[in-house]
């Protein structure tokens, strides 16, 4: 029955392990699927980022193209025709219809202004500090020149060339508010917004017009570390609170440069757009995971219930079988005792009769041992198990009776190799059965005495006798051996042995801790 229960527990443990492994695998699969969804939408966001960035880069290239055209004009136009040429350009050619003023300045080798089209009536007069700075400093950078005029921020794009020993400066100036109007019409289908700022933080484009010209580091969560940590769009974008939309956005940063500008662009993608697509997918994935686990647990429950039912039936059959085995053992014990009592009593009474006439004192001891022996035989335990020390005391009394009959023909010895006394048990009459079988099937004479040895350890009691079989074997129904085997079978012990080796018959009785 214990083996059945153990097998059932093992089977249930295996089933639970399989369910656990399957559940963990499905959990990781769900997480992996959700991660794939997020990565897919991250890629979509990055493509949207690149689309907006490329569109704005094309616009800034048009500014560079306008400046290149002006450079070609001053390179190829005679000096006396520059003024008329620029008047035509200012009337006809503007960068994407953005109001701008195209200008030129001719400076001789002594830094004297020979000719220009910047008058007091123009947007940028010749005495403007920035213009004077450009004239005086030949090494002045050509990027990020902004000037505030009448409260508005203007962008001056310029270039200089050397021609016929003279230095010619040319460029154009336009209002960043006008640039804002134009850039807000670029790529309006993309669900994101961008802002562009110079290296010093000056915002030159933002969807909110009143922020143009202000420092991006002051009115937003953007820091200078963002520009150094995100030089490309390969890393995962930050999720921040947008000061423009008042929503969480994925914020990208990357360098944004042209011939006339050096700075950064930040493109912001509303997180809610991603969540609207990813969250339902996540929810459905986890719903599938929970449903699958529920089905597996339900199957495990039904399997466990069916397993319980099957094992209950097996246990019931096992219990019934054990009852039959126990009843069989009791019947065998009863038959064995019925067999022992008449023969043993008859032989013992004959010996007692002889002792009374020869040695009355020894006869008294014999009578006492005989009384104790029969008391032990009559009072059999209900469990068919006795403590080893009780069985050993009985067998010593039994051998004492036999030794009176065979004083020199029978040699008996007990070797106790136990490390310490124990309360272990063995089948009732086990040692007596082994000793009696040895005497029953072997001759015992003065010339060939029968030696019986009992060896005790903490694990077993072993009975050994030398083999010298009788010529005429006595008939035996084998009740003793069947009885011992039945007891050990009942307690599910399979280490009981009875065998011959090197002219010695050996019976091994395992000790039980019951």
Image (spheres, rainbow, N blue to C red):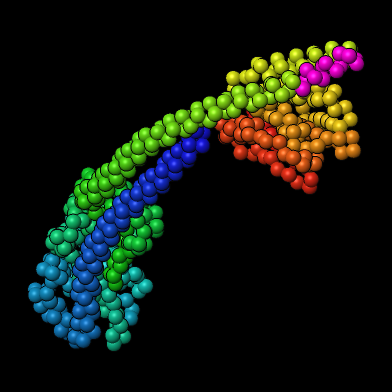
The part of the image, by quadrant, that contains residue 294 is top left
For residue 147, side relative to residue 87 (left or right):
right
Can residue 238 be seen from the camera position used here? no
Taking depth in this image into account, of 82 and 220 the one nearest to the observer is: 220
Magenta includes 349? yes
Q: Is residue 97 above or below residue 397?
A: below
Question: Which contiguous range is marked in magenta?
Answer: 347-359
**Residue found 58% across the figure and 32% down from its top:** 486
Q: Main secondary structure of the magenta part?
A: helix
Q: Is residue 73 left or right of residue 479?
A: left
The picture places residue 426, in percent across and down from the top left corner, at: 67, 28
**Residue drawn 34% across the image and 69% down it:** 141
Residue 413 on image: x %, y %? 83, 31
**Residue 331 point in image, percent of width and height:** 57, 25
Q: Quadrant of residue 395?
A: top right
Q: In the displayed structure, would residue 297 be above or below residue 429?
A: below
Left or right for 482, reference 465: left
Residue 405 shows in this picture: yes
Q: Is residue 74 magenta?
A: no
Image quadrant in which you'd find residue 84: bottom left
């Amino acid at each position: 029955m214990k083996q059945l229960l153990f097998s059932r527990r093992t089977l249930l443990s295996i089933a639970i392990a399989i369910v656990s492994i399957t559940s963990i695998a499905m959990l990781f699969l769900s997480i992996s699927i959700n991660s794939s969804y997020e990565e897919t939408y991250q890629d979509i966001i990055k493509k949207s980022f690149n689309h907006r960035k490329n569109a704005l880069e094309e616009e800034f290239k048009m500014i560079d193209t306008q400046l290149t055209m002006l450079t070609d004009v001053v390179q190829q136009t005679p000096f006396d025709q520059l003024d008329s040429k620029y008047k035509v350009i200012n009337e006809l050619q503007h960068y994407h219809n953005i109001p701008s003023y195209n200008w030129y300045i001719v400076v001789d080798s002594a830094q004297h202004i020979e000719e220009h089209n910047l008058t007091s009536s123009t947007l940028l007069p010749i005495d403007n500090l920035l213009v004077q700075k450009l004239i005086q400093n030949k090494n002045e950078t050509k990027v990020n020149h902004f000037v505030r005029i009448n409260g508005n921020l203007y962008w001056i794009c310029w270039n200089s060339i050397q021609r016929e020993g003279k230095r010619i400066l040319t460029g154009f100036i336009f209002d960043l508010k006008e640039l804002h109007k134009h850039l807000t019409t670029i790529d309006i289908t993309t669900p994101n917004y961008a802002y562009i700022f110079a290296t010093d933080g000056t915002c030159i484009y933002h969807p909110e017009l009143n922020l143009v010209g202000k420092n991006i580091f002051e009115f937003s969560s953007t820091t200078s570390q963002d520009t150094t940590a995100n030089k490309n769009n390969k890393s995962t974008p930050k999720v921040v609170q947008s000061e423009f939309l008042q929503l969480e956005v994925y914020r990208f940063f990357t360098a944004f440069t042209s011939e006339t500008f050096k700075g950064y662009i930040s493109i912001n993608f509303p997180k809610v757009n991603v969540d609207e697509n990813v969250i339902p997918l996540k929810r459905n994935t986890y719903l599938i995971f929970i449903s699958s686990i529920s089905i597996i647990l339900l199957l495990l429950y039904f399997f466990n219930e069916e397993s319980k039912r099957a094992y209950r039936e097996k246990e019931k059959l096992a219990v019934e079988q054990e009852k039959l085995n126990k009843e069989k053992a009791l019947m065998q014990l009863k038959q064995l005792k019925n067999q022992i009592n008449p023969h043993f009593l008859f032989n013992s009474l004959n010996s007692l009769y002889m002792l009374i006439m020869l040695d009355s004192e020894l006869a008294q001891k014999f009578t006492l041992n005989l009384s104790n022996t029969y008391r032990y035989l009559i009072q059999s335990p209900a469990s068919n198990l006795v403590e080893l020390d009780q069985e050993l005391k009985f067998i010593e009394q039994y051998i004492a009776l036999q030794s009176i009959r065979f004083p020199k023909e029978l040699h008996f010895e007990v070797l106790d190799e136990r490390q310490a006394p124990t309360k272990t048990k063995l089948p009732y009459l086990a040692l007596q059965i082994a000793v009696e079988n040895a005497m029953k099937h072997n001759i015992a004479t003065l010339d060939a005495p029968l030696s019986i040895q009992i060896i005790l350890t903490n694990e077993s009691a072993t009975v050994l006798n030398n083999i010298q079989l009788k010529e005429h074997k006595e008939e035996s129904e084998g009740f003793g051996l069947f009885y011992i085997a039945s007891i050990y079978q009942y307690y599910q012990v399979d280490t009981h042995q009875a065998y011959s080796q090197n002219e010695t018959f050996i019976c091994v009785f395992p000790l039980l801790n019951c």
